[in-house]
Amino acid sequence: MRIGFGYDIHRLVEGRRLILGGVEIPYIKGLDGYSDADVLLHAVCDALLGAAGKDDIGIHFPNNDPEFKGISSVELLKRVAAIVVREGLKIVNVDSTLVLEEPKLMPFKKRMRDNISQALGIPEASVNIKATTQEGVGAIGRGEAIAAYAVASVERAK
Ligand code: MG
């Protein structure tokens, strides 16, 4: 068994949609970025790439390549799953934590889990999403950004 870790952070700005875990969430701001800036899926991508020993998301999907401008991060996650499988590995589970002050994610977590489990081809029970606030501390606490952490485990495919 191998494990991988991922981290990402994106700024919250006006005039962008807020996409987390492939779900559009109604909010006054959205995350800034070259793709859809889905910070959760980016952290999950990096955790999986880490577990497979395959570099990071910026290497595979450079943010100066027009192919990836505005791309859905669900598509990036599917491509990462394919990279992991090509390495002869099977994805076992993913756990993640979003760090944000607002909005409340409870109503959306089920759909976010569904999206990740479908993109990775693993059961929903093998995908976990947690959310916590930054208790008002620092940039995330002021609502200027959202961060995400993720870990993934993989095993040799039989
Ligand atoms: Mg990112």
Image (tube, rainbow, N blue to C red):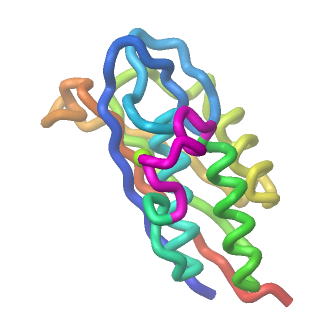
Residue 131 % position (x, y):
45, 40
Residue 85 % position (x, y):
75, 75
| Nearer to the camera, 61 or 155 | 61
Q: How many numbered marks have been drawn onto this rendered protein structure?
A: 0
Residue 43 % position (x, y):
47, 54
| Quadrant of image for the N terminus | bottom right
In the image, residue 72 above or below residue 12: below
Q: Which residues are magenta?
A: 60-72
> Image quadrant of residue 95?
bottom right
> Image quadrant of residue 21?
top right
| Quadrant of image for the C terminus | bottom right
Q: Is residue 148 left or right of residue 142?
A: right
Residue sitting farthest toward the right: 158
Q: Is residue 68 magenta?
A: yes
Residue 125 % position (x, y):
74, 55
**Magenta stretch secondary structure, dominant:** loop
Q: Is residue 24 magenta?
A: no
- Residue drawn at the location 66% of the way across and 78% of the way down: 154
- Residue drawn at the location 40% of the way across and 28% of the way down: 31
- Residue drawn at the location 50% of the way across and 45% of the way down: 40
> Image quadrant of residue 9?
top left
- Residue drawn at the location 58% of the way across and 79% of the way down: 52
| Nearer to the camera, 24 or 128 | 24
